[in-house]
Amino acid sequence: MPLVPLHEMYEAANKKYYAIGQFNVNNLEFVQAVVQTANEMKSPVIIAASTSALKYAGLENLVAIVKAEVKGISVPVALHLDHGATFDDAKRCIDAGFTSVMIDGSHHPFKENIRITKEVVDYAHKHNVTVEAELGKLAGIEDDVKVDAANATYTDPDEAVEFVEKSGCDALAIAVGTSHGAYKFKSEAKLDFDRIEKIKTMVNIPLVLHGASGVPAELIDKLTKYGGKIPGAKGVPDEAYREAVKRGINKINIDTDLRLAFTATVREVLTTKTAEFDPRKILGPARDAIKEVIRQKIEILGSADQAYAGKSTDEELVMN
Ligand code: G3H
Ligand code: 13P
Ligand code: ZN
């Protein structure tokens, strides 16, 4: 099945209150893990590449790998640019075959964020490509930070309305307490669910949760057992996903958990099988570990068996 733009997946997700996972990739094994798991679970899925992933793998290479992998499957897959910084980042990806792009102008002043987002929207929509924008700052909020300080970085609902109206973006990443990486919270995870719900009611477009990795204990334990060191790492618990989705989040971004699964498994193989030097026997198990993480996320987000949601029975049959 050819790659699809996000709006074709969002409609059903928005109506039925489930979320679609965005999984970040850097190479063949990551792409295969995402596509295979989505296909096995009959789930729509978003493959994302950051600008640094594109620099690492090569834009054309990554697009070619993704297109080849989705050829034999029938679930909808979108190829999405994660955190594009400039119009040129977005244009390069659109021209190369991406079906969705993020333009992250969140570090710019409000008006400049609108301007740069609209510039990307105007180009993307001409090519049937979906645009995600970001409003608010995703920095982690420590436990002792005052509410005022949180308010200054979290997404303001009134600004969100004006932003969506003026920029024309299709989806909005909001800041509600998560942050990127493996160190998100000092103690208890705190997400501003009421803010998600308020923004959702006011803007009524799909909302995106970045920095959503769970950093699960079993991955930390495995990494640590085989020599890794990430003391104090903490992520978003499963209950928080469920609540966030219930309140209106339709897309959840996961990168760190895949990296943890990959690295913990590579460490395990290299430690337990010291005579092994066939890369396929090292990267194969790592790919399986990534698949398991993706499987768990798809389960929690509720997108399993939703690949054909919104399609008529006839279309479903054709796709099958
Ligand atoms: O949101 C950021 C992603 O985790 C991408 O990270 O720039 O290291 O590829 P990266
Ligand atoms: P994590 O670092 O929590 O996986 O977040 C990834 C992300 O937001 C990619 O855009
Ligand atoms: Zn992000």
Image (spheres, rainbow, N blue to C red):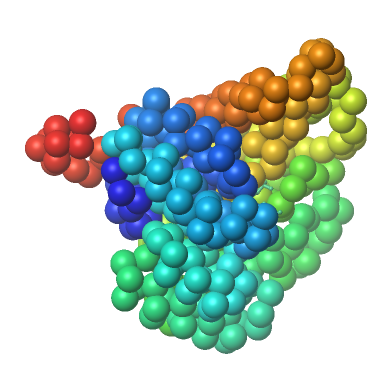
Is residue 194 left or right of 42 when viewed as pictured?
right
Tell me the quarter of the picture where residue 189 sits.
top right
Taking depth in this image into account, of 58 and 314 the one nearest to the observer is 58
Position of residue 22 measured from the top left corner of the image (x, y, whole percent): 51, 46
Q: Residue furthest left?
A: 314
Which part of the image, by quadrant, shows the N terminus? Answer: top left
Is residue 91 left or right of 185 when viewed as pictured?
left
Position of residue 21 measured from the top left corner of the image (x, y, whole percent): 49, 42
Up the image or down, 77 lies above or below 83; here it is above
Which part of the image, by quadrant, shows the C terminus? Answer: top left
Taking depth in this image into account, of 56 and 131 the one nearest to the observer is 56
Up the image or down, 261 lies above or below 159; here it is above
Residue 286 appears anywhere in the view: no
Identified at 76% across, 22% down, the residue is 277
Taking depth in this image into account, of 176 and 315 the one nearest to the observer is 315
Tell me the quarter of the picture where residue 204 sits.
bottom left
